[in-house]
Image (spheres, rainbow, N blue to C red):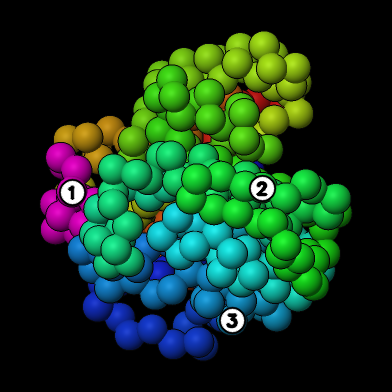
Amino acid sequence: MDYGAHLPLLGLNGRPWSLQRLMEYAETAERLGFKVLCTNDHLVFSRPWLDGPTSLAAVLTRTGRMSLATTVALPVVRGPLALAKSLTAIDLLSGGRLIIGLGPGSSARDYAAVGIPFEERWKRFDEAVQAFRSLLHRGSLPFKGKFYSTEGITLEPYPAQEPGPPLWIGSWGSEAGLLRTARLGDGWLASAYNTTPARFADAWGRLGEVLRAGGKDPKQFPNAIATMFFHVTEDRSSAERVIREVLSPTLNRPEDELRERLLVGPAQECAERLAAYQAAGVQRVFLWPVQDEALQLEVFQERVAPQVQAYSGP
């Protein structure tokens, strides 16, 4: 299991955004050995949210050898053509380092903001992914559906990767979501605050069955868990404050649920939780520091990651 880092785009602590802050964070993540730098996507949210694709593009020169990822981007909300154009530029300018995670999004506010019925999100998303593959993958046939069509459109320049960047599908693990992931995706992206090690293991096993039934090799189908908010502290009162005052109201999730699922608290407990995810089959975890972002990346690599490695053995 390895680790990626979310860019700190969500206004969790009142700090002002700046390009310098984002670049220093990216440099820290690269220096510490994080494998991927990623951004999540919302137009409107319960707290201010800096635009994901723009921010990822802004720090490209500071990302070194790290892969880049969207975890996830919203092709229905943004429009598949416009989003494909933006992400193609990121893949091209990064030298082919982009993994494109796609999802419908779970916020009705995003859909209301762009005038698209929230109840249409799944039908539109199925088409949007197919349109994405048609637009970004060289040699793909045009796609024509009820909502989107790529007929007569050649989106040049093409991405650096051939035939195109891998498309991972975001799913919380429902039966329909896993079927969609196997049918449309090149990888699976789960959500930390919507799963547990036991639930992930069950979903991963079911996804493997679906992949095999469709003629795909589960061993060649990667997975990751995104939005793993974390704050490593030995101070219990500080951990409780982060859960109660920051994460629970921001994510609209019960405090007990977040205590069980996220990495907030002593280093040993965080390591035990990650070791359980690793045993469940998780291959990568995208970490999202709640505050003191660059410092927390340091703390994680110094105090948590070695303990996870110790649990898993040589």
Q: What is the x, y in percent for residue 19?
A: 50, 87
Q: Nearer the viewer, residue 161 or 156?
A: 156
Q: Is mark 2 on a helix, strand or loop?
A: loop
For the point 56% across and 45% down, the residue is 145
Q: Which residue type carries mark 3?
A: Ala
Q: Distance between the residues labelled 2 and 3?
A: 31 Å
For the point 65% across and 25% down, the residue is 313
Res 252 label: 1
Q: What element carries label 3?
A: helix
Q: Is residue 186 magenta?
A: no
Chain-order first, disc 3 or disc 1: 3
Q: Is residue 193 above or below residue 150?
A: above
Residue 55 appears in view: yes
Q: Which residue type carries mark 1?
A: Asn
Q: What is the x, y in percent for residue 147?
A: 48, 50
Chain-order first, disc 2 or disc 3: 3
Chain-order first, disc 2 or disc 1: 2
Q: Does the magenta stretch include residue 243?
A: yes
Name the residue tied to disc 3. 58
Q: What is the x, y in percent for residue 248?
A: 18, 50
Mark 2 touching mark 1, by CB under 8 A?
no
Name the residue tied to disc 2. 143
Mark 2 touching mark 3, by CB under 8 A?
no
